[in-house]
Amino acid sequence: MDASALAQSESNRYPPASGPIHTIFVLGVLGGWAFYGKILADHLSAAANPSRVRFYVLTLLFEWLLFALVLAGVRHSGAPVLIVLGDRWHSVRQVLRDIGIAAAFWIVSVGILFVLAWLLRVAALGRKMDFILPHGGVEIALWIALSITAGICEETIFRGYLQRQFIALTRNVPAGILLSAAAFGAGHAYQGFRMVILIGLFGAMFGILAHWRGSVRPGMIAHAWHDSLNGVLAGVTRH
């Protein structure tokens, strides 16, 4: 097979979910939110009584709006929405299988994260982000809602959409996964440079899972569970 035929084969194997202009716009919106999120986080960290509820609600609304923007772009391009989500569940067995995959992935990825965090020496830095974590019942409930939102929206945006776009652009799966992971880490810039690296590596693990499974659903489950557990444990230990 010659080079042009091989390139065409790879293009057919990983078709883009939308056009390049839409992808650039999505990346621009993400960049703007990362900048604004840094400003909000700085205000929270400096406040004597930080308004976490406002931060949670704004983040929740933004993620659903960006989720809608991504799906609208996919629909406008004529591609099926399932191209960024993976096949639907058709049985309870399939649901349980993905829950099992999510559980196994979470256990392994948390172990890897622990080692990476130690190597990057981010444990003390992580404690400096405690101002974001919930206090009390209302904030914990909002945190769980935000965690579920992050699981659904961020896995769709970064692994379902951007990862596919980057793979289609580069015609290279590892490159697509790494570029999507870099965007995921950059979206959390308000947590500091070393946390961006750690979160980006976590994103790469989610990217590998999504590519292997051919669906973002196990990643959604693991992502929502991981974020929810962190918030609930923080809220419980403070009381």
Image: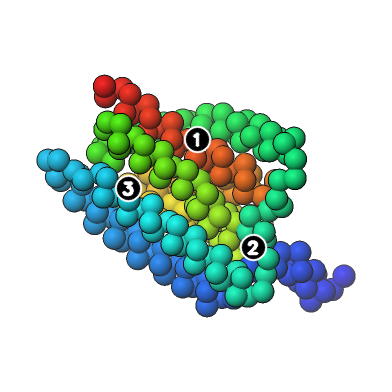
Mark 1 residue element: helix
Label 2: which secondary element = helix
Mark 2 and mark 3 in contact? Answer it, CB < 8 Å. Answer: no
The one nearer the camera, 38 or 182, is 38
Q: Left or right: where does residue 198 sit relative to residue 42?
A: right
Furthest-right residue in view?
Answer: 1
- Asked which quadrant contains residue 64, the reply is bottom left
- Of residues 67 and 108, the one nearer the viewer is 67
Give the mark nearer the N terminus: 2 vs 1.
Answer: 2
Q: Tell me the kind of residue under disc 1.
A: Trp
> Between marks 2 and 3, how big is the CA–CA gap?
27 Å
- Sequence-wise, the earlier of marks 1 and 3 is 3
Of the residues under marks 2 and 3, which one precedes in the sequence? 3
Residue type pointed to by label 2: Val
What residue does disc 1 label?
225
How is the structure coloured here?
rainbow
What's the residue type where badge 3 is placed? Tyr
Numbered circle sitting on residue 56: 3
Q: Is residue 145 visible?
A: yes
- Numbered tag placed on residue 81 in the rendering: 2
Which quadrant of the figure has residue 81?
Answer: bottom right
Point out residue 131 in the picture as x, y percentages from the top left corner.
24, 39
Residue 219 position within the rendered picture, expressed as x and y whole percent measured from the top left = 58, 43
Indicate the position of residue 53 as horizontal and vertical percent values. 27, 45
Mark 3 crowd level (few <14, some 14–19, many ≥20, 10 Å Cα) = many
User: In the image, which is nearer the foreground, mark 2 or mark 1?
Assistant: 2
- Relative to 167, is 115 above or below? above
Q: CA distance from mark 1 to mark 3?
A: 17 Å
